[in-house]
Amino acid sequence: MKTWASINQKGGVGKTTTVVSLAGHLAQSGERILLVDLDPHGSLTSYLGYNPDDMESGIYSLFSHPTTSPAEIARMLLPTKIKNTYLFAASTALATLDRQIGSQKGAGKGLVVQKAIASVADKFAYGLIDCPPMLGILMINALAACDQLLIPAQTDYLSLNGLERMMHTLEMVQTSLKKKTPYMVVPTMYDQRTRASQDSLKKMKEIYRFNVWGSVIPIDTKFRDASKAGTPLPTLLPYSRGSLAYKKLLNFLLGIDSLKPHEKTIHQQPA
């Protein structure tokens, strides 16, 4: 099973939209998809029709009950409106994890999600993780569990600053994990009519070079319609601009193994 994580410490850049849209396209090809919501805000869980405030099982249970059996983990999977797609849901209790684990000596909770995904991996072709917008035990779990990082970054100057902080965080965590995960910056909310979007995209490519996807996800108001309907845009309006852009991204990701080694590591900025 290939596992991709959508990650950025800045909110509102399209992390959940990226997960849902890629899942929608993958499901149309008949693949079985696992979605994992690691964000205490539960945006992905809410998008798919579940209330994070009411979740009694799911990701939080994996941390609070470390002896959960593979059969019990499989029963935590929730069906979704997306064909052949299941969800490990988030609960608002996830927001308390860092405080709880911080008081436990030798907790060893950095691989909880990886182990849970591994226990059901034979049931799915792809896994997509929606990450929290902050450094903590949940982000560490996401980095340990995924094969590929997607970093949605809005094409504006504030997002560029946030992207720089995200890179420092990745370098620090991956050094701790002793694992270098391939990553790709995905320019989002691109508005070709504005100079700000054009300049931000240019700057993004100058700094991160080979690690920036060669295309963009454009601004498309249809994403709001899809969110309101609780349905991926590729399902609701498959030929909309946003849907076609994510199809292009998916096609690229499916060929990601062809990247050269230097394109698969964290970009080192000059001192």
Image (cartoon, grey):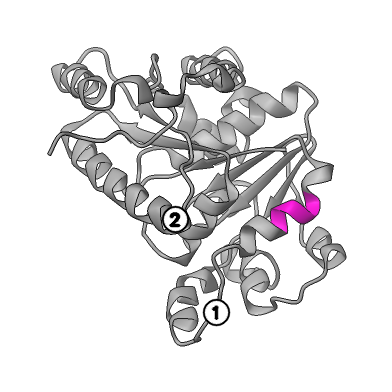
Relative to 35, say whether 243 is above or below.
above
Give, as a single range, the part of the protein colored magenta: 116-120
Q: What distance separates the C-alpha of mark 2 from that of mark 1?
A: 20 Å
- Exactly how many numbered labels are in the figure? 2
Could you tell me which secondary element the residue under label 1 belongs to?
Answer: loop
Q: Amino acid at mark 1?
A: Ala
> Horizontal and vertical percent for residue 111?
60, 62
Mark before the other along the chain sequence, 2 or 1:
1
Q: Is residue 271 left or right of residue 250?
A: left
Q: Is residue 117 magenta?
A: yes
| Residue bearing mark 1 | 107
Could you tell me which secondary element the residue under label 2 belongs to?
Answer: loop
| Residue bearing mark 2 | 132
Marks 2 and 1 close (CB-CB < 8 Å):
no
Quadrant where the N terminus is found in the figure? top right
Q: Nearer the viewer, residue 6 or 175?
A: 175
User: Where, by quadrant of the figure, is residue 84 drawn?
Assistant: top right
Q: Residue at x 49, y 75 (%)?
A: 97
> Horizontal and vertical percent for residue 152?
39, 35
Which of label 2 and label 1 is nearer to you? 1
User: Where, by quadrant of the figure, is residue 176 drawn?
Assistant: bottom left
